[in-house]
């Protein structure tokens, strides 16, 4: 895929070096691709309406209302997406198994300090949530793009987890759900959502009881170390 600052598959994606993101990615069999098509269509419709007003330089209450509706629809999409993920009990692999979890942690932490800064991530049985910052440039002076980071993470983990499971073929769904984090309040909610996902799924009572959870710079963070 050509690297660019905006691209789309079934959902629109936006990326720019130096941005912060909240990303959800699931195993290929976890959620049927068209299960949330209603949300996808509504999101695309709202996005197109906002784009038209922006191109016309029409800054009005209508534009603000559409942006608010878009953010609300994205939150509903994420909630519906997660509900479907939590309902699944049959996985092609279990990402939260100890060895798979270690592979996932290795991947998330590999680019730390060079290309990204991690805030929080959570490895669930069939998906992960991840809040992090991309640097504007890496240690070699190259711009850091979200799609390159995700390609690296998904490629490495698929290869290693497949090898461990004695399987072949695609591990991840082709498309990830990513949201650009707008401000500190948005970042706080993304981190809170990430670390509390195992609690919401009913796996544990406290977030730090789940061994697949990582939270930056806190003594109560949990990892495989």
Image (spheres, rainbow, N blue to C red):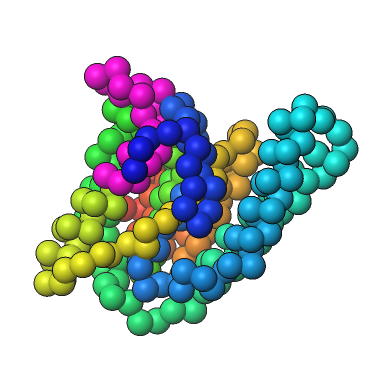
Q: Position of residue 179 (x, y in %)?
A: 54, 45
From this view, report whether residue 221 is shown above or below residue 199: above
Labels in figure, total: 0
Extreme-bottom residue of the structure: 90
Residue placed at 40% from the left, 26% from the top?
135
From this view, report whether residue 182 is shown above or below residue 80: above
Q: Is residue 72 covered in magenta?
A: no
In the figure, is residue 112 to the left or right of 23? left
Residue placed at 61% from the left, 35% from the top?
182
Q: Quadrant of the N terminus?
A: top left
| Residue 46 visible, this angle | yes
Nearest to the observer: residue 181 or residue 28? 28
From this view, report whether residue 201 is shown above or below residue 213: below
Nearest to the observer: residue 37 or residue 139? 37
| Residue 202 visible, this angle | no
Nearest to the observer: residue 133 or residue 192? 133
Q: Position of residue 148 (x, y in %)?
A: 33, 39
Residue placed at 62% from the left, 41% from the top?
186
From this view, report whether residue 188 is shown above or below residue 154: above
Q: Position of residue 74 (x, y in %)?
A: 63, 54
Nearest to the observer: residue 219 or residue 39? 39
Residue placed at 28% from the left, 75% from the top?
92
Q: Is residue 146 covered in magenta?
A: yes
In the figure, is residue 54 to the left or right of 22? right
In the figure, is residue 33 to the left or right of 166? right
Extreme-top residue of the structure: 141
Per the rendered image, the range of residues in magenta is: 134-152
Extreme-right residue of the structure: 61
Residue 165 location, quadrant: bottom left
């Amino acid at each position: 895929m050509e690297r660019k600052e905006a691209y789309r598959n079934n959902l629109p994606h936006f990326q720019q070096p130096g941005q912060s993101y909240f990303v959800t990615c699931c195993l290929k069999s976890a959620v049927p691709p068209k299960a949330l098509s209603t949300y996808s269509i509504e999101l695309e419709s709202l996005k197109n309406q906002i784009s038209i007003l922006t191109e016309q330089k029409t800054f009005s209450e209508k534009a603000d209302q559409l942006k608010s509706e878009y953010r609300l629809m994205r939150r509903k999409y994420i909630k519906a997406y997660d509900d479907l993920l939590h309902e699944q009990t049959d996985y092609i692999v279990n990402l939260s198994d100890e060895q798979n979890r270690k592979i996932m942690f290795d991947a998330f932490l590999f680019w730390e300090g060079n290309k990204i800064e991690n805030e929080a991530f959570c490895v669930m049985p069939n998906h992960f949530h991840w809040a992090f910052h991309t640097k504007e440039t890496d240690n070699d002076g190259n711009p850091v793009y979200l799609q390159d980071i995700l390609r690296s993470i998904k490629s490495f983990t698929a290869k290693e987890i497949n090898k461990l499971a004695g399987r072949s073929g695609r591990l991840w769904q082709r498309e990830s759900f990513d949201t650009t984090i707008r401000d500190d309040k948005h970042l706080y909610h993304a981190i809170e959502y990430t670390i509390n996902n195992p609690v919401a799924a009913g796996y544990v009572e406290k977030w730090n009881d789940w061994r697949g959870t990582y939270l930056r710079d806190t003594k109560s963070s949990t990892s495989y170390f």
